[in-house]
Image: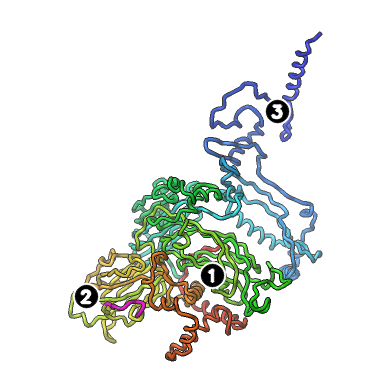
């Protein structure tokens, strides 16, 4: 008799042998299965477990390929998952192949195609994605806390193939529009152009933890620091084909491989050794070092009628700059021609990378001080945030020592957006009632609703514009932008909502304005909903702001506004030759932008009166490109037949400090044969421009103040520039509503003594007193005309008065378009686009 125990054992062993030889469901080959107790081995830490001999098997050498496709990483651990080798999916329903192709259009020609498109006019269509085939690579970053995934990096391996169907809903006889060859080709090219932004080596980084957390509010900036570049001077070799006479040099600063221009200097003509002395700040994100970004300095020769010529360029690796962070290095390197790699000259510059600072820290980018971690407000905020950094940003105000940093702005949505109508509330619900009429429904989308878009202005400079959301009362933008801010204490942000209209100038629906010193009083981030005001519409806009300082300390003169007004309070001339003292007059001009020579400015003694009480005693010169510009003092001969510049002094506006009233500037007057060289090349007030043989014949002493922000002096220049007309309209609305007080100053530091007496009177004046005073005033005819014009402008801004008729608004739109087209014919081509657009 056999032993039952042994029989059972042998049966189990036979079963194991049977189960060891199985077929793989994918390849169909034999797969050998091993027990976990056989040949036990100690797997070293960090070794790839897929290279060990146990299932899943190596599917024809695909294991190494999978490691490059799908790699999840955490600290001291690497995981790889054996999945289908090609990450692709394809959807091909029968409707895609059974629908007959529309082959009639190519045979009948363009007239038939146009008639075919005419049949689709005003038709409701059904658009769907019927198939997508593509290959992508993903990389996941694991974390120990839920949802256990932090970032996901996605990149496409080649362009995907996408098939789209567009068919009318009501007209069953009309075929699929994508069967028309030239339309399908256009749509395919558009999809490929969008998908090309994510094809390797480009990629898209998704914050999965943030997406799954809920609110969608960014509590940190995507950029990790800034690269500061200061261009000092350039020297072009004589073997280059350009000569000094026809050379119009300017510098472009780009970030490769995108090669998008981030900054452009002014144009300096007539020299092979231009001195720029301009500073640019570039934002750098976390992927800059991974994808091998490089800062490219390009020297161009500007031509009026033909394409500009690239003279030479220099490239600096961003990874090398990040390895020596928070310090700047001055270098003089050779430029190379991109086509022949020959040396074309030298460039002298200073460059450095400066990282973000941790909240409350003065030296570390990651370590949060212990005193912040122990605060009760931090512990309370930590319960609703994902990390300690987010909680510290929410409860820690920006530092006073490092005022420069990265400002992130998010535009989420607008609720209850609409256009105000006269007596609307009275018509609906009666006087004094605030409830909705019975049976009235809130309409979210309709033809009569506004097509809104938002424009973000930082320090009176338009920096971002969203796409237009057509005909909806609840537009969802979910758009964000980040900008470098020189001084958060003096910065203001204005978000303007406009209505995109056909054959009309886009009216202002409303706006909201913020001073960062008030917004970040209790923390470095703020989010909330604000009511739209001072426009023809109403609604509530939801915004979020976050500020992260960088470990960068810039001189006080370099943290000011780019737009402002130069106010000359006094000017005195001292000529070394006393015999010329009575025969010389002074005229002022600026070299940057659209300002003209201010005529009739002679010698003035310093006025003891306050600028607010006697503004006519000052000289106001509008500036729109402050860090490109200089104040030019022309000493000219008096008399009708003796006119001509005999000497010139230069004060570069980059050396002035905003709102600094006590500064007295002394500059030398230089006599030379080439005044254009002095006006264009940077030099200190007491020095002559490099490479110019000049003789000092006197000195000029001035009291100059740079007032930041748009002012009334900009009216003529901004109205003549089509790109600045909307900014001027927004300025006039803000000024009319009292939003232009204390621009450029720290809101917490302004007291009653800093406000002029007229402003204080306006704050306490009652409406009844104002009306009585306006009725009994007996001003001059000129003052009455100005008052009437101001009232009409106020009514027109709200589409009241004569602007309530659409025909008048259309006529104004046609006149503005014709005037802008005529003014654009004689302008030099623009090289600088400061506003980023979402679409």
How far is disc 2 from disc 3 in space, using C-alphas? 99 Å
Picture quarter with the C terminus: bottom right
How far is disc 1 from disc 2 in space, using C-alphas? 50 Å
Mark 1: few/some/many CA within 10 Å (<14, 14-19, 20+): many
Residue 368 among magenta residues: no
Q: Which of 626 and 529 is in front in this view?
A: 529
Q: Nearer the viewer, residue 111 or 39?
A: 39
Please name the residue that numbered disc 3 is placed on: 31
How far is disc 1 from disc 3 in space, using C-alphas? 69 Å
Whether residue 174 sits left or right of residue 628 in the image: it is right
Q: In which quarter of the image is residue 239?
A: bottom left
The residue segment tinted magenta is: 606-613
- Residue at the top extreme, as displayed: 1
The disc at residue 77 is: none
Q: In this view, does 295 lie above or below 608?
A: above
For marks 1 and 3 on the same chain, the one whose residue lies earlier in the sequence: 3
Picture quarter with the N terminus: top right
Colouring = rainbow
For marks 2 and 3 on the same chain, the one whose residue lies earlier in the sequence: 3
Q: Quadrant of residue 589?
A: bottom left
Q: Is the magenta stretch mostly helix, strand or loop?
A: loop
Residue 608 among magenta residues: yes
Residue 262 image position (x, y, % from top left): 46, 59
The disc at residue 574 is: 2
| Tag 2 secondary structure | strand
- What residue do we see at 58% from left, 65% from top? 541
């Amino acid at each position: 008799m056999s032993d039952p125990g042994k029989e059972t054992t042998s049966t189990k062993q036979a079963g194991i042998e049977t189960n060891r030889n199985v077929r793989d469901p994918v390849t169909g080959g034999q797969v050998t299965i091993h027990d976990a107790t056989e040949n036990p081995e100690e797997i070293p830490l960090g070794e790839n477990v897929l290279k060990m001999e146990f299932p899943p098997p190596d599917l024809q050498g695909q294991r190494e390929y999978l490691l490059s496709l799908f790699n999840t990483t955490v600290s001291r651990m690497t995981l790889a998952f054996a999945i289908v080798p090609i990450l692709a999916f394809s959807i091909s329903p029968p409707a895609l192949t059974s629908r007959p192709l529309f082959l009639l259009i190519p045979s009948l020609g363009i007239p038939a195609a146009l008639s075919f498109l005419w049949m689709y006019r005003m038709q409701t269509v059904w658009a769907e994605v019927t198939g997508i085939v593509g290959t992508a690579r993903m990389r996941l970053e694991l974390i120990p806390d839920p949802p256990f995934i932090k970032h996901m990096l996605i990149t496409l391996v080649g362009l995907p193939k996408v098939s789209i169907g567009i068919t009318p809903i009501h007209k069953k006889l009309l075929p699929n529009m994508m069967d028309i060859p030239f339309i399908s080709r256009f749509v395919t090219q558009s999809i490929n152009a969008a998908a090309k932004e994510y094809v390797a080596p480009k990629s898209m980084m998704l914050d999965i933890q943030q997406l799954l957390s809920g609110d969608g509010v960014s509590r940190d900036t995507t950029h990790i620091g800034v690269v500061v570049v200061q261009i000092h001077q350039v020297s072009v070799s004589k073997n280059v084909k350009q000569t000094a006479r026809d050379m119009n040099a300017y510098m472009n600063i780009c970030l490769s491989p995108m090669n998008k221009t981030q900054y452009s200097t002014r144009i300096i003509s007539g020299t092979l050794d231009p001195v720029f002395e301009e500073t640019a700040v570039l934002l750098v994100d976390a992927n800059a070092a991974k994808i091998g970004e490089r800062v490219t300095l390009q020297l161009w020769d500007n031509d009026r009628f033909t394409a500009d010529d690239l003279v030479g360029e220099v490239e600096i690796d961003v990874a090398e700059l990040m390895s020596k962070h928070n310090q700047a290095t001055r270098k003089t390197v050779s430029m190379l021609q991109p086509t022949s790699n020959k040396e074309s000259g030298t460039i002298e510059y200073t460059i450095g990378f400066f990282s973000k600072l941790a909240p409350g820290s003065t030296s570390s980018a990651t370590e949060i001080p212990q005193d912040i971690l122990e605060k009760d407000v931090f512990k309370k905020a930590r319960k609703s945030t994902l990390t300690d950094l987010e909680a510290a940003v929410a409860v820690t105000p920006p530092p006073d020592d490092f005022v420069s940093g990265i400002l992130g702005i998010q535009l989420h949505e607008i609720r209850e957006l609409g256009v105000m109508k006269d007596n609307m509330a009275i018509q609906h619900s009666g006087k004094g009632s605030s409830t909705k009429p019975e049976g009235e429904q809130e309409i979210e989308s309709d033809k009569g609703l506004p097509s809104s878009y938002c424009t973000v202005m930082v320090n009176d400079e338009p920096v971002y514009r969203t796409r237009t959301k057509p005909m909806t009362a609840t537009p969802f933008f979910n758009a964000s932008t980040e900008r470098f801010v020189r001084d958060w204490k003096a910065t203001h942000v204005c978000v303007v909502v406009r209505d995109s209209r056909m054959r009309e100038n886009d009216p202002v629906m409303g706006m909201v304005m913020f001073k960062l010193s008030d917004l970040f009083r209790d923390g470095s981030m703020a989010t909330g909903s604000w009511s739209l005001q001072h426009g023809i519409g109403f609604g509530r806009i939801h915004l979020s702001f976050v500020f992260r300082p960088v470990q960068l300390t810039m001189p006080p003169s370099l943290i000011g506004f780019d737009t402002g007004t130069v106010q000359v309070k006094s000017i005195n001339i001292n000529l070394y030759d006393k015999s010329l003292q009575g025969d010389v007059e002074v005229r002022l001009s600026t070299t940057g932008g659209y300002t003209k020579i201010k005529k009739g400015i002679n010698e003035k003694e310093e006025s003891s009166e306050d600028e607010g009480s006697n503004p006519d005693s000052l000289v106001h010169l509008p500036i729109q490109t402050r860090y490109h510009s200089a104040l030019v003092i022309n000493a000219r001969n008096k008399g009708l037949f003796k006119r001509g510049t005999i000497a010139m002094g230069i004060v570069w506006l980059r050396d002035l400090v905003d709102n600094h009233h006590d500064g007295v500037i002394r500059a030398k007057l230089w006599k030379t044969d080439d005044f254009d060289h002095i006006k264009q090349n940077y030099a200190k007030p007491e020095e002559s421009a490099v490479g110019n043989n000049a003789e000092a014949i006197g000195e000029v002493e001035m009291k100059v103040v740079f007032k930041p922000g748009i002012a009334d002096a900009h009216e003529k220049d901004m109205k003549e520039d089509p790109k600045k007309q909307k900014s001027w309209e927004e300025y006039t609305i803000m000024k009319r509503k009292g939003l232009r007080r204390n621009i450029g100053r720290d809101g917490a530091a302004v007291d009653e003594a800093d406000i002029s007496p007229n402003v204080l009177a306006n704050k306490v004046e009652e409406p009844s007193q104002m009306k009585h005073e306006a009725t009994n005033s007996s001003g001059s005819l000129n003052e009455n005309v100005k008052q009437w014009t101001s009232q009409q402008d106020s009514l027109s801004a709200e589409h009241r008065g004569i602007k309530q008729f659409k025909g008048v608004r259309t006529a104004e739109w046609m006149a503005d378009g014709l005037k802008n087209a005529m003014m654009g014919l004689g302008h030099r081509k623009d090289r600088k686009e400061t506003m980023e657009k979402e679409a």
